[in-house]
Amino acid sequence: MGTSERREREREEMKDLILRTAMRLFLEEGYEKVSMRRIADAIEYSPGTIYLYFRDKDEIMYALHSIAFRKFYQSLSVMAAEGSPYERLVNGGARYLDFALDNPELYELMFIMRAPARLIEKKGEEWEEGKRSYNLLRATVEEARDAGHFPSDVDLDAATLFIWSTVHGLASLAIRGRLEMFSGERMRDIMHNAMRTMLALSAESQRSDTGATEG
């Protein structure tokens, strides 16, 4: 390995150390209470070293959020695979739950902490990383509607938000320790089955409402 390659590797390792340490501190101590100096102290470097990589803690949080949503989208990509739209919705929901259970710190940062949302507003930008995950779910819901699993006049955004918020609720309960009456794989199985039940009941309810209206 040449000198330039070694320096690049060392730079990436330092950047990764800063990000991992910052995420831990943000979650343990709260985003507002963590300073650049606090992060520097935690990794035993000077604050000047941190500033070589990130302009401020907002930029660190933004980087963490981008990394988290890229991993999240990869988990949800099963919804773009083969199979019926309804099966892909079920599989996507299961992968969503698995992501939250396997990456509780990232999930907390993405969907529970308030700081990331404020940072996006501050930048005045659309959150493209998060938007494409939402659009993937919405497109799958649209395909499920076109396949007859939901009424033809269903509000796609309302249906998408309903599915997302329900699965998010299950994930949030789990990572916050509110489902400790179930342990290990049993909790995972129950969450998957709860999500499947929600989707099945939702589709059946929509079909029943449409039938009653037509009758």
Image: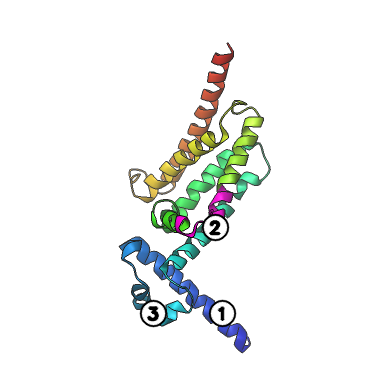
Q: Quadrant of residue 41?
A: bottom left
Query: Which of 8/173 is in front?
Result: 8
Q: Residue furthest right?
A: 82
Q: Is residue 3 magenta?
A: no
Viewport quadrant of the C terminus? top right
Please tell me how crowded label 3 is: few (under 14), some (14-19), or many (20+) other residues with Cα within 10 Å: some
Query: What span is colored magenta in the figure?
Result: 121-133
Label at residue 71: 2
**Numbered disc in front, either 2 or 3:** 3
Q: Which residue is mark 3?
A: 47
Q: Amino acid at mark 2?
A: Lys
Amino acid type of the residue that numbered disc 3 sits on in the rendered structure: Pro
* Residue found at x 58% / y 54%: 74
Whichever of labels 1 and 3 marks the residue nearer the N terminus, that label is 1
Residue visible at 48% across and 77% down in the picture: 14
Percent of width and height locating residue 181: 33, 43
Name the disc covering residue 9, or none: 1
Mark 2 nearby-residue class (10 Å; few <14, some 14–19, many ≥20):
few
Dot 2 lies on which element? helix
In the rendered view, would you say 164 is above or below 147?
below
